[in-house]
Image (cartoon, rainbow, N blue to C red):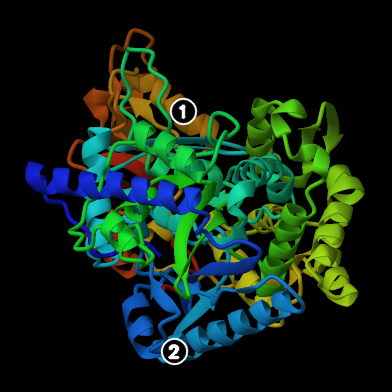
């Protein structure tokens, strides 16, 4: 969940004091390792469930703080956005019916969230990226009022040296510049924790890296962002780009992003790992720390290594090693951060059983992975899995194999063996791994979403399609039916729009002209595309005017004169009445009636982002 008591204080003395604590934490950890004080012989599992809060129209809520106050349960905590919360499940021993116990607690806590949410006319949704998130909900207005989040936003923008630039290419393309880290709030995950043995750190961590691609391939659930069809697991690219603090320069400098898969196999113990991380990433956050880790250790107490954990919490490795203290005993765990939330709690627990079973079922020949597999292959597998899901082909121990085939033939048997090794009953193994098997043979969450989104778009505007899709996700989640059994969304043929803002109904695929284009060319643009309104923009896509078909009539003869030198800037309306994406539809309708105009260009910070016309407003029942 992260440490919320952090500081933006740039005081050199305070910063150096924190750095001293950081170095002392490393020394204390080194002693814990050398004195064999880290817990061993025990394996626990734990998880963090991030979830979305949506309103009755299936759009993001802003009631997270109210829901959190009402639920009154220490398992719950805030997230970056006001439409997200997080549940921290209790760590339990990896044995017996542990996954049934975890699923039972998760469902119990989700039910608490549902009951509290209902008091505010809100609903709980599990999904990797909420399809109905729009640019409105990515403003700082929706950031949770918490010192940690505000501090991270300030420092990451400062480190970046300006705005965050993002570009995603899938079936659609999305290029955007944003002024905060709020795009990170789109990501909703099911983070899985597995305790590992201290003397097995190198082999266990490298194995976790190697299996990341195939595990992700069958767990993908986040193909949509802002109405665009992008990667099967768009979260992977989005999380990295949304908080990338690296500056762009003409110098060719290799520097890791704060969200990273890594650049090589790990060597050595956990202390070597943290030394490498501290050398690679600047310190963003500090805090006042009262206890000295080395003094705590000398006094016979186990230090919590607060400085080291704070720094580690600002480095977002997809497989992140963590140090923690439970019941007075220090231990190591790997935090799997790449699995999306949803599509159901049962799907998530199946994902966990598959991953944890694989971790425990590691064959002896993979103890030294650098001898078996190139690191670049593991990293490439991860990126390809994020792009294409189980439809991709992976490189595995020197051979190329389809993801589904690799999982069905090689990895599921290894996972089953690992779960058997931990003492799980066969019916439990069959239940959870059977979901992974069926998903391989039928459909993943992303495949279901893409198929139904394309179907809905054929008959509805994009916004209506994503609302209908979100409604279908919500309704399918209610009985915990795994996603491979979800039906198609044919029941939404007569869907009624839930649009409330201009941004929900505006057309974003625009035909525009430059102010220096000839007037005759603008007329042809309108003929070819069967439109009656043509926005005029400058070379930075800022709106500078508009030409309407009715307005053209007064220049008809001049435009058709072969010797005409009329340009778009000569005939365009320069005083343009506009709306913003957040403008209520009712207000836009009244404005168009009052001004007797047939369209409203939609601008954001001066840039043209869409347009609505009277045709878009036909049959709208705004909410």
Q: Mark 1 points at which residue?
A: 525
Q: Could one spot residue 324 in this view of the protein? A: yes
Q: Position of residue 43 (x, y in %)?
A: 65, 65
Q: Quick one: quadrant of the C terminus?
A: bottom left
Q: In the rendered view, would you say 429 is above or below 218?
A: below
When asked about the image quadrant of residue 75, the answer is: bottom left
Q: In this view, does 135 lie above or below 167?
A: below
- Looking at the image, which residue is at 11% across and 45% down? 10
> Against 609, is 470 above or below?
below
Which corner quadrant holds the N terminus? bottom left
Q: Nearer the viewer, residue 512 or 7?
A: 7
Mark linked to residue 116 = 2
Say few, some or many: other residues with alpha carbon within 10 Å of mark 2 (under 14 / 14 to 19 / 20 or more). Answer: many
Residue at screen point 77% across, 34% down: 394
User: Secondary structure under badge 1?
Assistant: helix
Say which quarter of the image contains residue 553.
Answer: top left
Mark 1 to mark 2 CA distance (whole Å): 53 Å
Say which label, 1 or 2, has the lower sequence index.
2
């Amino acid at each position: 969940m992260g440490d919320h008591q952090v500081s933006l204080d740039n005081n050199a003395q305070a910063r150096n004091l924190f750095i001293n604590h950081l170095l002392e934490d490393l020394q204390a950890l080194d002693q814990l390792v050398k004195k064999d004080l880290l817990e061993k012989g025990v394996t626990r599992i734990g998880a963090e469930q991030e979830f979305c809060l949506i309103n009755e129209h299936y759009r993001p809520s802003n009631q997270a703080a109210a829901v959190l106050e009402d639920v009154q349960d220490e398992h719950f905590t805030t997230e970056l956005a006001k439409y997200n919360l997080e549940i921290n499940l209790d760590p339990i021993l990896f044995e017996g019916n542990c996954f049934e116990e975890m699923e039972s607690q998760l469902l119990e806590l989700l039910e608490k969230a549902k009951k509290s949410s209902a008091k505010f006319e809100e609903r709980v949704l599990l999904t990797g990226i909420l399809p109905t998130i729009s640019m409105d909900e990515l403003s700082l207005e929706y950031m949770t009022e918490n010192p940690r989040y505000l501090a991270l936003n300030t420092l990451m923008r400062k480190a970046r040296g300006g705005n965050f630039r993002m570009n995603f290419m899938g079936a659609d393309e999305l290029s955007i510049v944003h002024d905060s880290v709020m795009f990170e709030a789109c990501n909703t995950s099911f983070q899985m924790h597995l305790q590992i043995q201290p003397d097995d750190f190198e082999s266990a961590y490298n194995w976790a890296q190697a299996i990341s691609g195939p595990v992700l391939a069958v767990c993908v659930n986040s193909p949509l962002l802002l109405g665009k069809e992008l990667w099967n697991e768009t979260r992977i690219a989005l999380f990295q780009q949304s908080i990338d603090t690296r500056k762009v320069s003409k110098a060719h400098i290799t520097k890791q992003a704060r969200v990273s898969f890594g650049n090589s196999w790990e060597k050595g113990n956990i202390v070597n790992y943290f030394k490498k991380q501290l050398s690679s990433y600047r310190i963003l956050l500090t805090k006042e720390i009262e206890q000295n880790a080395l003094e705590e250790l000398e006094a016979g107490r186990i230090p919590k290594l607060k400085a080291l954990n704070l720094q580690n919490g600002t480095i977002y490795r997809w497989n992140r090693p963590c140090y923690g203290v439970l019941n007075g005993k220090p231990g190591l765990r790997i935090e799997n951060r790449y699995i999306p939330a949803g599509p159901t709690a049962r799907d998530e627990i199946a994902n966990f059983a598959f991953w944890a079973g694989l971790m425990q079922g590691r064959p002896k020949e993979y103890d030294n992975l650098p001898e078996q597999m190139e690191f670049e292959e593991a990293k490439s597998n991860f990126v390809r899995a994020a792009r294409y899901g189980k439809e991709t082909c992976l490189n595995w121990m020197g051979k190329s194999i389809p993801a589904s085939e690799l999982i069905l033939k090689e990895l599921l048997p290894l996972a089953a063996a690992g779960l058997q090794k931990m003492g799980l009953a066969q019916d439990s193994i069959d239940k959870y791994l059977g979901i992974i098997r069926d998903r391989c043979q039928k459909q993943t969450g992303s495949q279901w979403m893409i198929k139904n989104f394309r179907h809905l778009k054929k008959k509805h505007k994009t916004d209506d399609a994503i609302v209908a899709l979100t409604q279908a996700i919500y309704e399918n989640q209610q009985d915990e039916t795994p996603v491979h059994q979800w039906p198609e969304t044919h029941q939404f043929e007569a869907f009624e729009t839930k649009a409330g803002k201009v941004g929900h109904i505006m057309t974003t695929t625009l035909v525009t002209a430059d102010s220096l284009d000839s007037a005759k060319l603008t007329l042809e643009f309108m003929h070819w595309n069967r439109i009656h309104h043509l926005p005029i923009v400058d070379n930075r896509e800022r709106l500078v005017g508009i030409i309407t078909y009715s307005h053209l009539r007064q220049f008809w003869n001049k435009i058709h004169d072969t010797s005409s030198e009329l340009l778009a800037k000569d005939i365009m309306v320069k005083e343009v009445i506009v709306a913003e994406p957040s403008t209520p539809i009712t207000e836009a309708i009244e404005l168009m009636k009052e001004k007797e105009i047939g369209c409203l260009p939609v601008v954001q910070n001066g840039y043209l982002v869409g347009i609505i016309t009277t045709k878009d407003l036909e049959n709208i029942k705004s909410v």
